[in-house]
Image: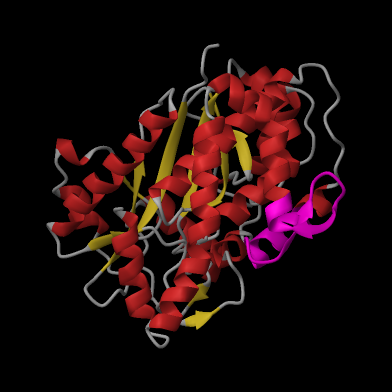
Amino acid sequence: MTRRTVGVEEELMLVGADGAPIARAQDVLGTAEPDDGPLEHEFMEEQIETATPPRSTLEDVAAAIREGRAGAQAAAERHDARIAALGTSPLAFAGTTVGKLRYLQARAEFGLTAREQLTSGCHVHVAVADDAEGVVVLDRIGPWLAPLLALSANSPFWMGDDSGYASFRSQVWSRWPTAGPTRVFGSPQAYHAAVTGLVGTGTILDQGMVYFDARLSAKYPTVEIRVADVCLSADTATLLAALARGLVETAARAGDEPPPEVPVEILRTALWRAGRSGLSGDLVDPRTWRPAPAHDVVGALVEHVREALVDLGDLGTVTELLGGLWSQGNGAMRQHAWAAQSGGNLGAVALAAADATLL
């Protein structure tokens, strides 16, 4: 079968020798070289974004993720900075908004929500034939997005404190008015009408601020799955890409089968639970909407997309990567371990994450 292409965008923190975020994005991007790969601004000067080209095989996806991280590190090193795949900074920060008009407008309009938006996510783009197929996908993948957040959870610390969440980034991100899960749309016309209606309220600046957990990309012929923290390891980012593609393929094959009618409030609560617990406690099981151990829910996700993974040739790699994740723990679990080993030194946690980013 023809494999759908997949691309991965990663937002990465810029940290200094003490592990604290440093505002060097303008300098880093200003001297970036072609070999560093495609690098972009994000909302804050303390972070940059990488983007892989569309790739068909997981081997190529994994290589592109590592190449993107290596290129970003090379660019950062020229300005005495390091990259760190952290969903939030373990250390307290005073964020510096990038000096672009749109970002400055957002800072003025959204106040503390914008000023504290030093968070890093991972966005997976999976190719679809057209908007019609894209909406079929969006209407069916919602119940399975929370387990993706749990797998990627990598932001347990906030402003120098243990937040009590595996993904506190998901809490900070949920402050935006359009963030979160969506209802069943049923057609491209209904989807685009919803986007137009949100922009028409005058509450958000433009279509780019429609921050659904999964949306039709405005730039590419893809479904963009945006629910995840940036993954600590390249292996976990590859696993996330594989499962996202499996979800899209499985949903697209459903054709005219009615999508599950799950209330948005249930989807939102399942996502909150995933952000709180990560892989360390119960999640909400999309098969029953009752609590179940994270291992069981992740297993159910793999079973849900198994046929697609087999057809894509991805099942073996997914099984191997999942085994590594259960063995090592996700980013939140590893950050907590580093904090315990260092006697609560959160700067050391950030630097350990910078080391792990390049493995």
Residue 120, image x, y percentages:
45, 57
Q: Report the front residue among 270 and 33.
A: 270
| Residue 15 drawn at (x, y percent) | 28, 67
- Residue 25: where, in percent of width, then height? 26, 57
Image side of residue 39 versus residue 303, left or right: left
Q: Relative to 52, is 105 above or below?
A: below
**Is 290 included in the stretch rendered in magenta?**
yes
Locate residue 174: give its quadrant: bottom right
Asked whether residue 118 appears in the rendered view, the answer is: yes
Give the magenta part as a residue range.
268-296
Residue found farthest to the top: 1
Judged left or right of residue 344, residue 79 is left
Q: Is residue 228 above or below residue 318?
A: below
Measuring 42% from the left and 41% from the top, which residue is drawn there? Answer: 9
Quarter assignment of residue 248: top right
Query: Residue at position x 58%, y 53% from top?
Result: 151
Q: Residue at x 31, y 53 (%)?
A: 359
